[in-house]
Amino acid sequence: MATPTADMTAALSAALTAGAAQARADLEELCRIPGIAFDGFDPSQLQRSAEATAALLERSGLQGVRILTDGGAAPAVYGEHAAAGPGQPTVLLYAHHDVQPTGEVDAWTSPPFEPTERDGRLYGRGCADDKAGVVAHASAVAAWIEAAGAPPVNVKVIIEGEEEIGSPHLDAFLEATGDLLTADAAVIADLVNWQVGVPSLTTVLRGMVDVHVTVEVLDHAVHSGMYGGPVPDPLTALAKLVASLTDEHGVATVPGLRAGLRGPSPSEQASLDALDFQVDRFRAEAGLRDGVPFGGDPDLPVLQRIWMEPFLSVLGIDAPPTQQATNAIQPHASAKLGLRVGPGQDAAAIRDVLVDHLNAQTPLGARVEARPGAAGDPFETNTDTRAAQAMLSALEEGYDTAPVLMGCGGSIPLLGPLQAANPDAAMLLVGVEDPDSRAHGIDESLHLADWESARASIALLLGKLAT
Ligand SMILES: [Zn+2]
């Protein structure tokens, strides 16, 4: 591992400090754009978000900046800096510029697309997930250009535009772009740190599966008084169907749904045991109501349930809203189910197990039609690589605190295909969020001091990876 000279370290540190105000302004600018890739949202805003991201990469000194829609993907943004030359490794910096929908806007303390600082945190949709990652990468590159004229390694930056909908065009995108994203190491700045002030390297993530299910009973809605009784209620049938999938702890009991699941390895067990999991803090962060017990297998550590166990939930139900409910039996009812799968499991195969199981059910005699949605595999990476050790060292310097190894219950569909395209590359999964960030929720926020540390860590990593 190259040791950057003291002069260079000081110059980089000065450039990071000098660039802080610009980075903050860049972040706020991006956070004002409601770029959402979900169906039903204005795609021109996603395009605006991509254009603003491209402008940011150009301002930061990246070259060949362009918006890519290969393979039908929502607009992604690419830029590179290859002045280090063939003798140096290539590092891919990944983040995404699309954001989740806001949920109920009135429930936000400040408007979701007006970034607002309170108590050292910047509130707004996307401030943490993942525009903080976008700007951290760009400003790390800018700091190197300021300090040394160029980054010490070759850098590729890819900012995805459809991560929040499960990266549906990812395989086609990677195929269409060939070796564009080939690298020796990839920094994925879209994870959660263990605590405020305590950085993490994430080594295991769950995968994610969607299934759509419809229960069909009637041609058309009928009067619940005139027909109810002989005619069964499809919403009740759907409720029975969904309830039949889990036990009293919410653990999915569908046969075959745990196929392939591996338990923690000895080293994972050691990190599970070493982490100081605070039950009360976790309950508070989640906002879990008093008296509501934890779900999942009560014999397993809570962290293992989050990081390594399957979890089935209902993501949505199509039904009349209660305020507009009439005395009618609906003709059909639909639900979207989400299933997190654990390390070792094949997401598409598990999804098909669930689809087949649902299609074989007849709640209240109703016809059930299930169809598969997206499937993203779980992911695991090891920390024995030179790149992972460099990342741990950079995090320790950037945060001035030793990093921890952890898992993540969430999913990043990109990781599997990206690793498959770069079988030898180290995947370095680092946080810009903390447990209070409420990514995807109301009042999402970024811890600004930790973000400074994350920015510094990414910049320091580039120096440590230079040979
Ligand atoms: Zn994200």
Image: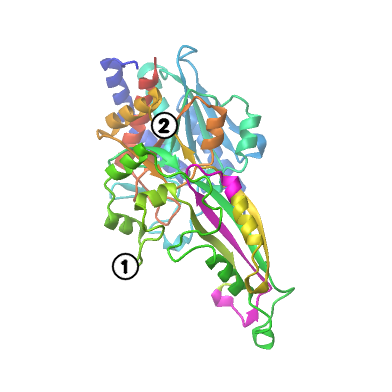
Tell me if label 1 and label 2 are in contact, CB under 8 Å: no
| Residue 39 x/y as whole percent | 61, 52
Task: Name the residue carrying label 1.
Answer: 290
Q: Residue at x 48, y 52 (%)?
A: 310
Instruction: Please tell me which residue lies in front, 298 or 183.
Output: 298
| Residue 166 x/y as whole percent | 56, 46
Q: Is mark 1 within 8 Å of ligand 1?
A: no
Give the total of numbered labels. 2
Crowd rating for badge 1 (residues with CA inside 10 Å; few <14, some 14–19, many 20+): few
Magenta segment: 322-350
Above or below residue 132? Residue 360 is below
Quarter holding the N terminus?
A: top left
Above or below residue 10? Residue 375 is below
Magenta span contains residue 333: yes
| Residue 327 x/y as whole percent | 62, 83
For residue 146, say whether it is visible.
no
